Amino acid sequence: MPLWQEWLHLTGFGQRSQWLFYDAFLRARALQRLQFLRHNGGDSVLFVVLPDSCRELEMLVTGLLLDNGKGILRTLPVGQPLDELPLVCQSILPTALVLFAPTPLSPTQLSKITKLAQKVDSPVALAGVGAELAAEQLRSSPLANLGKEPQVMASRLEQFLSGHLDT
């Protein structure tokens, strides 16, 4: 993704269009891969990015890395309102809900996420930079911390789903 990030900031004539084309192509391929891996039935983990914290491609690539080829991850669209997640989870009945926080969390956001975890019937985990920076506060909450590094997140997700992650 380095090229994608580099082109994001280019401002010359035609460069924004070039980036948009590249972004659309990569998003389509990442989404296609997630859908290809998706198993029908069995465990499903709902993966949601916190509102206004990243672009769709970043969320999809993180989802692919977190899924680690298992086909259990279901991503919700960027912009999913957090307060509607209990309703969504009630409908989908996921094995777990993973909230992706690629940026630091404010105390208000952390409080809102903690309250959300109490309203959802599924276990809830937080992943990304926000989880890593809020590690101390997460110890006394119902949220599991999956960390920020993709390999660590995937490993902790496996432990979380099997009930062996110490939250």
Image: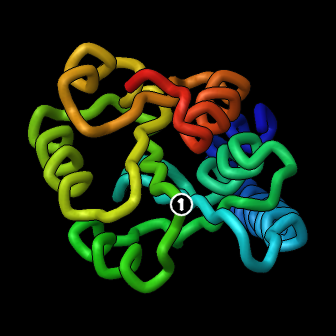
Q: Is residue 155 left or right of residue 100?
A: right
Instruction: Work out whether residue 13 can be spotted.
Output: no
State the image quarter where residue 66 is shown. Answer: top right
Q: Is residue 1 left or right of residue 56?
A: right
Residue 4 picture location, percent across and down: 75, 44
Q: Residue furthest toward the bottom?
A: 91
Task: Please name the amino acid that badge 1 sits on.
Answer: Thr
State the image quarter where residue 121 is shown. Answer: bottom left
Instruction: Tell me the crowding category of disc 1: few under 14, some 14 to 19, or many 20 or more residues within 10 angstroms, Cα based.
Output: some
Instruction: Compare residues 125 and 41 and report the one nearer the observer.
Output: 41
Residue 75 picture location, percent across and down: 60, 66
Residue bearing mark 1: 95
Residue located 58% across and 59% down the image: 45
Q: Is residue 156 above or below residue 91?
A: above
Q: Is residue 107 left or right of residue 56?
A: left
Q: Residue furthest toward the front?
A: 163
Q: Residue furthest toward the top?
A: 136
Q: Is residue 54 above or below residue 34?
A: above
Residue 148 picture location, percent across and down: 54, 25
